[in-house]
């Protein structure tokens, strides 16, 4: 699947992708737009849950110190 044309802005910069990131983008691109939005929402929720867990764990560790 060929990427769509992307307009470069002066502030854009090249980012080197890891093999995992590249694979994730290739898989993600295979889904229709509505599914992509749902995947983004699910990943965002998962990230927030992980951040909350880590924050609670760190706070608990601080109480033990």
Image (tube, rainbow, N blue to C red):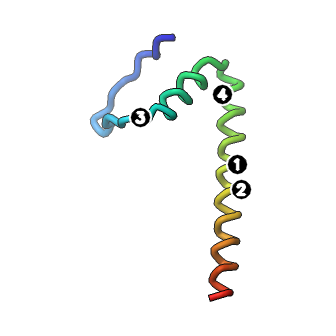
In space, the residues marked 3 and 1 are separated at their CA atoms by 22 Å
Q: Going from the N terminus, do you reach mark 3 or mark 1 first?
A: 3
- Which quadrant would residue 30 be assigned to in this image? top right
Q: Going from the N terminus, do you reach mark 3 or mark 4 first?
A: 3
In space, the residues marked 4 and 1 are separated at their CA atoms by 15 Å
Numbered label attached to residue 25: none
Which is more foreground, mark 4 or mark 1?
A: 1
Disc 1 residue crowd, few under 14, some 14–19, many 20+, Cα 10 Å: few
In space, the residues marked 2 and 1 are separated at their CA atoms by 5 Å
Label total for image: 4
Disc 4 residue crowd, few under 14, some 14–19, many 20+, Cα 10 Å: some
* Residue that badge 1 annotates: 46
* Residue that badge 4 annotates: 36
Q: Secondary structure at mark 2?
A: helix
Q: Going from the N terminus, do you reach mark 4 or mark 1 first?
A: 4
In space, the residues marked 2 and 4 are separated at their CA atoms by 20 Å
**Rendering coords of residue 46 (x, y %):** 70, 48
* Residue that badge 3 annotates: 17
Q: Secondary structure at mark 3?
A: loop
Numbered label attached to residue 49: 2
**Rendering coords of residue 2 (x, y %):** 46, 11
In space, the residues marked 3 and 4 are separated at their CA atoms by 19 Å
Disc 3 residue crowd, few under 14, some 14–19, many 20+, Cα 10 Å: few
State yes or no: discs 2 and 1 in contact (Cβ < 8 Å).
yes
Q: Going from the N terminus, do you reach mark 2 or mark 4 first?
A: 4
Which is more foreground, mark 2 or mark 4?
A: 2
């Amino acid at each position: 699947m060929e990427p769509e044309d992307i307009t470069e802005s002066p502030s854009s910069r090249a980012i080197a992708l890891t093999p995992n990131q590249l694979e994730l983008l290739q898989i993600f691109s295979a889904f229709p737009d509505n599914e992509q939005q749902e995947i983004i929402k699910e990943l965002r929720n998962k990230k927030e849950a992980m951040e909350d867990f880590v924050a609670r764990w760190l706070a608990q560790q601080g109480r033990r110190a």
